[in-house]
Image (tube, coloured by chain):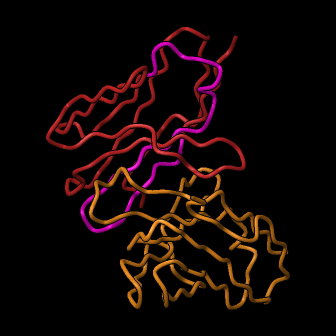
Amino acid sequence: DQQVKQNSPSLSVQEGRISILNCDYTNSMFDYFLWYKKYPAEGPTFLISISSIKDKNEDGRFTVFLNKSAKHLSLHIVPSQPGDSAVYFCASYGNDYKLSFGAGTTVTVRA
Amino acid sequence: NAGVTQTPKFQVLKTGQSMTLQCAQDMNHEYMSWYRQDPGMGLRLIHYSVGAGITDQGEVPNGYNVSRSTTEDFPLRLLSAAPSQTSVYFCASRDLSGPPDGYTFGSGTRLTVV
């Protein structure tokens, strides 16, 4: 039973436009949330995170929003660039040393 | 600074064979873990360790063994490979004194069991 769900397996966006990736979680004990980016034949790399005490965190073109009452977070990428084409994983952490991952969303940025 | 090194990168096994996937890190991280990635499933935790001599099970531990005799190494053993273990395996490490942002992943081992 997956505790972290990414219901959109893929997203196609035009270069320069906004990409919005969504993630839902079920475990209310999760208190830290992360987004990872993964290119083919490479391991996941950390992108951005947010603590449960915040509702927004920005890092350059990347912003993560957290809605604790809805158990929902989203990642906004503005503007989208061709190098953003990758698989994005949402992950949650609940202070038990374990990261729980969603199934991933494949983002394709069209020129 | 090599980070997390996984070997081999690719492996084909026959059903019933055994093998060990190697993982080594040079960052003196206390925490090490193994994940498997399957289509539509994301990454699922197999086993993890919070220090030398300490291991624990993750979400999908059946069919896998681990040991942690040193801080640097965390090998994953398949005792009798099954086609259901065909997957991409990732090792990750982390400094437990820092925030959960600090997981470093290896580049993966692609395993096929025929």
- Residue B88's x, y, as percent? 68, 62
Residue shown at 41% from the left, 32% from the top: A22
Q: Is residue B90 left or right of residue A72?
A: right
Q: Residue at x 58, y 73 (%)?
A: B24
- Residue B78 placement (x, y as % from top left): 67, 85
Establish if A82 lies above or below B73.
above
Q: Residue A66: x percent and y percent?
A: 25, 34
In the displayed structure, A94 sits above or below B76; it is: above
Highlighted magenta segment, given as a residue range: A77-104
Residue A98 sits inside the magenta stretch: yes
Q: Nearer the viewer, residue B102 or A65?
A: B102
Quadrant of the snapshot with the N terminus of chain B: bottom right
Nearer to me, A83 or A13: A83
Numbered-mark total: 0
Q: For residue B52, what is the image quadrant?
A: bottom left
User: Residue B42, position in %: x, y?
Assistant: 54, 53
Q: Is residue B2 magenta?
A: no
Q: Quadrant of residue A34?
A: top left
Residue at image coords 54%, 79%: B74
**Which tint is chain A?**
red
Q: Is residue B81 above or below residue B33?
A: below
- Output the letter for the chain in orange: B
> Where does the C terminus of chain B fall, quadrant-wise?
bottom right
Residue A96 drawn above or below residue A9:
below
Q: Nearer the viewer, residue B102 or A55?
A: B102
Residue at the image position 43 percent from the left and 20 percent from the top: A61
Tell me if B48 is positioned left or right of A50 in this view.
right
- The residue lying toward the viewer, choosing from B2 and B4, is B2
